[in-house]
Image: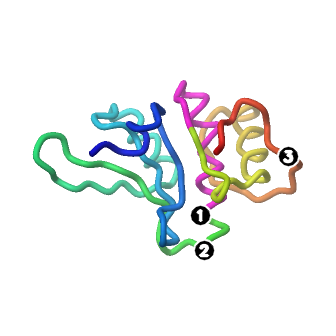
Amino acid sequence: MGSRADVEGTDVTIYLKPLTDAVHADTPTGAPEQLLALLDQLGFERRTLPTPGPASVWHEAPAHLDEDAKKQLATHAVPWLHKAGYVVRIDDDVWDAAAYTDAATAVRDHGAPAPPLAVPAMGRPAGTRRR
């Protein structure tokens, strides 16, 4: 069984794991270390489950964060992942427009990942796929 990123054909799929408050960032089976390291750098925690064949690897927003902070972290990662050339899909239930606006501004102005900040924003920018 593949990850949601395998099933959906994305480099990263960010979603709320059903029946939990865990925000997952799934990557395809055998994802490059560069992508996994970028998710680490963006504040996600890497999890690995040894399996026959390739290990199952995914990332989660840190469990100690509250619901809003998890959404901000997840959404904040999107423009940085886009800048690195990755295809990302993020579910509506973890989307935070303010976090996206802040991160998109940081990408434009600074070029290096920064921690998520909550600032008021309107709407969702074009080019971000949600379901």
Labels 2, 3: front one:
3
**Element type at mark 3:** loop
Return the residue at label 2. Answer: 66
Q: CA distance from mark 3 to mark 1?
A: 19 Å
Task: State the mark number for residue 123.
Answer: 3
- In the image, residue 98 sits, relative to residue 80, either above or below, namely below
Mark nearer the N terminus (3 vs 1): 1
Q: Are marks 1 and 2 in contact (CB under 8 Å)?
A: yes
| Residue pictured at 72% horizontal, 55% vertical | 96
Return the residue at label 1. Answer: 70
**Element type at mark 1:** helix
The outermost residue toward the left is 52
Is residue 72 left or right of 47 when viewed as pictured?
Answer: right
| Residue pictured at 18% horizontal, 40% vertical | 54
Q: Tag 2: residue type?
A: Asp
The outermost residue toward the top is 85
Magenta stretch bounds = 71-88
- In the image, residue 48 sits, relative to residue 54, either above or below, namely below
Pick the residue in front: 113 or 32. Answer: 32
| Residue pictured at 38% horizontal, 41% vertical | 36
Q: Are marks 2 and 3 in contact (CB under 8 Å)?
A: no
Residue 66 at x, y percent in the picture: 60, 74
Q: Residues within 10 Å of mark 3 (few under 14, many from 20)?
A: few
Pick the residue in front: 57 or 119. Answer: 57
Residue 23 at x, y percent in the picture: 51, 61
- Is most of the magenta stretch helix, strand or loop? helix
Q: Tag 3: residue type?
A: Gly
State which quadrant residue 2 falls in: top left
Pick the residue in front: 124 or 92. Answer: 92
Residue 75 at x, y percent in the picture: 64, 50
State which quadrant residue 68 falls in: bottom right
